[in-house]
Image: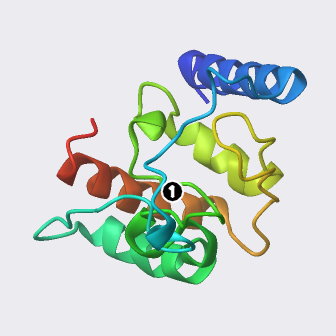
Amino acid sequence: MGRYTILSVALAVVLGIGFWWTGPTDDDVATTTDDASRANGPMVDVALPEVLSANAEVGKLAYDAKCAACHGANAAGQDGVAPPLVHKIYEPSHHGDAAFLLAAKNGVRAHHWRFGNMPPVEGVTDGDVKMIVAYVRELQRANGIN
């Protein structure tokens, strides 16, 4: 691994531990429209890209198998279950690709949303997560999140 890759991973780990250690504050917790009709439904409307790259196509299959049960179809979240990944909180400048890998491997202590902690995802490989991230990033870009 290159020096910058190691530093990036180390920084992501330190930041992740910091969030885990301090827990959420009201400023950290994202909110969405309180619409009772959305109970367990999608939290955001997601515009789909016209075409997905080959990696994102593979990522969509893995996402549908391992992530959609909680994070909803097309990463739109599920009210009362799990947050949308097509959201400015998960833009690359705030949650880099390594954060997704760490979340899948280790789980995440709640820090932006009030859904509770995310458990580790069983049976997902680093390669699966890389493809899932490709899919999520393409969805984000189609929705103006860069």
Q: Image height check: is 112 above or below 51?
A: above
Q: Quadrant of the N terminus?
A: top right
What secondary structure is marked by label 1?
helix
Q: Image height check: is 25 above or below 103?
A: above
Residue drawn at (73%, 22%) of the image: 25
Q: Position of residue 78 (x, y in %)?
A: 54, 67
Q: Is 75 situated left or right of 109 in this image?
A: left
Residue drawn at (28%, 62%) of the image: 46
Residue drawn at (39%, 57%) of the image: 136
Residue drawn at (77%, 25%) of the image: 19
Q: Is 20 situated left or right of 100 in this image?
A: right
Q: Position of residue 111 (x, y in %)?
A: 72, 34
Q: Nearer the viewer, residue 42 or 69?
A: 42
Q: Position of residue 52 (x, y in %)?
A: 21, 69
Residue tagged 1:
130
Residue 93: quadrant of the picture: top left
Q: Is 119 situated left or right of 56 in this image?
A: right
Residue 114: quadrant of the picture: top right
Residue at the extreme left of the image, as rendered: 50
Q: Position of residue 99 (x, y in %)?
A: 62, 39
**Kind of residue sitting beneath label 1:** Lys
Q: Quadrant of the C terminus?
A: top left
Q: Nearer the viewer, residue 1 or 99?
A: 99
